[in-house]
Image (cartoon, rainbow, N blue to C red):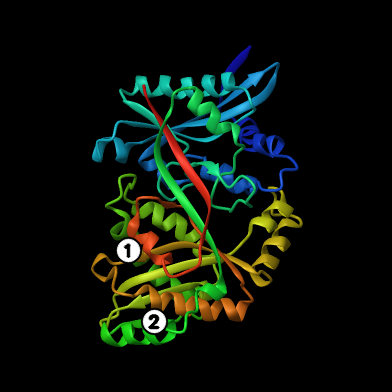
Amino acid sequence: MITIKEMKTKKEMKNFVKFPFELYKNNAYWVPPIINDELASLDKTKNPVFENAEARYFVAEKNGEIVGRIAAIINWTEVKVQEKKKMRFGWFDAIDDVAVTEALLNKVSEIGKENNLEFIEGPVGFSNLDKAGLLVKGYEELNTMVTWYNFPYYKEHFEQLSFEKAEEWIEFKFDVTDIMTPKLERFSKLISEKLELNLIDFKSTKEVLPYVDAMFGLINDTYSSLSTYVPIAQSQIEHYKKKYISFIHPSFIKCVADKDGNLIAFGITMPSFSKALQKANGKLFPFGIFHILNAQKNNDKAAFYLIGIKPEYQSKGVTSIIFYEFYKTFIEKGIKHLETNPELEDNVSVQALWKNFDTELHKRRRTYKKEI
């Protein structure tokens, strides 16, 4: 018999967060989160996203053991302002038993009905800054710190339960040598001169911070036309500024300004922390932090995490400036391999960024939906 239990206490939430550690134990491709960070992101007293969202957390138990988990989420900005009657679900994991998956999803549907919502969709997070998508291709590729990993049977479960494809994201990988074409340096200088643009070169995190609000403003401008996009609140920006920006080495952040000093484009990359997080196994201390710091300094792999371009500057070659500057940083830091963050497959403007590189589409992620 399957029992669904809501997780509320600190001990229960820790069990909720730690369930995947057992499910994916010894899996070579799963990348564990830092447990305390995960707990904080799920805590309504610590994560400002809960100013406009709510969530409840459940596990499925069988014979007294946890066999699955799920978060039932409502983003009220999405529901009330954008008028999307969507019940979200995320942090979904389960053993290979479709009855467990069904019981968890039924609980989410039940909450959706109580709130007069029309359909459920997931896996997604609270907002666009969270992880999203069920892995449907790339099960033998190392996961990244900003995505979920799952077994192939997850997809089978959703399709057996008559869930339909909602959105799909794709990810690419390529080598640093594919960035530098003979024309890139010359084209970068040409675009800079023609459009009167300047690179903002950061030497310290302190120099980056004054530009963070403008970066998030560009994210809103760049992605607001996408069907899945929910605007980022200022409180969330402040939260992510404290949580992530100080963590990123300034040389992995590139910004471009117009002649008046206004930010018109930016890119953020980071060395891959996947292997370091596997070694840390959910804990920063006593030794996990050393694996993270080592990955910052000694790494041959990096990921593109965010790129934002002011709409009127899109398709004008501005990315050549960013790519050329990243190329120089990658060579200096010994980075040889790159991969992109998940991108919506219908986001043609972002896909166009990689058209001149010898890329391999190595992962696909998908959300599933069903009427309530």
Whole-percent x, y for residue 24 in the image: 69, 39
Location of the C terminus by quadrant is top left
Residue 357: image location, x then y, percent: 47, 69
Left or right: 16 in relation to 185: right
Q: Residue furthest top?
A: 1
Give the residue drawn at x 47%, y 47%. Answer: 130
Residue 96, compared with residue 52, is above or below; it is above
Give the structural element (helix, strand or loop) at label 2: strand
- The N terminus is located in which quarter? top right
Q: Give the residue at mark 2.
A: 199
- Which label's residue is closer to the chain start, 1 or 2? 2
Is 193 rendered above or below residue 324? below
According to the image, label 1 marks what residue?
Answer: 218
Amino acid type at circle 1 is: Leu
The secondary element bearing badge 1 is classed as: helix
Q: Residues within 10 Å of mark 2 (few under 14, many from 20)?
A: some
- The type of residue carrying mark 2 is Leu
Q: Measured from the top left, where is residue 133 in percent x and y? A: 48, 42
Answer with the quarter of the image where residue 295 lies. Answer: bottom right
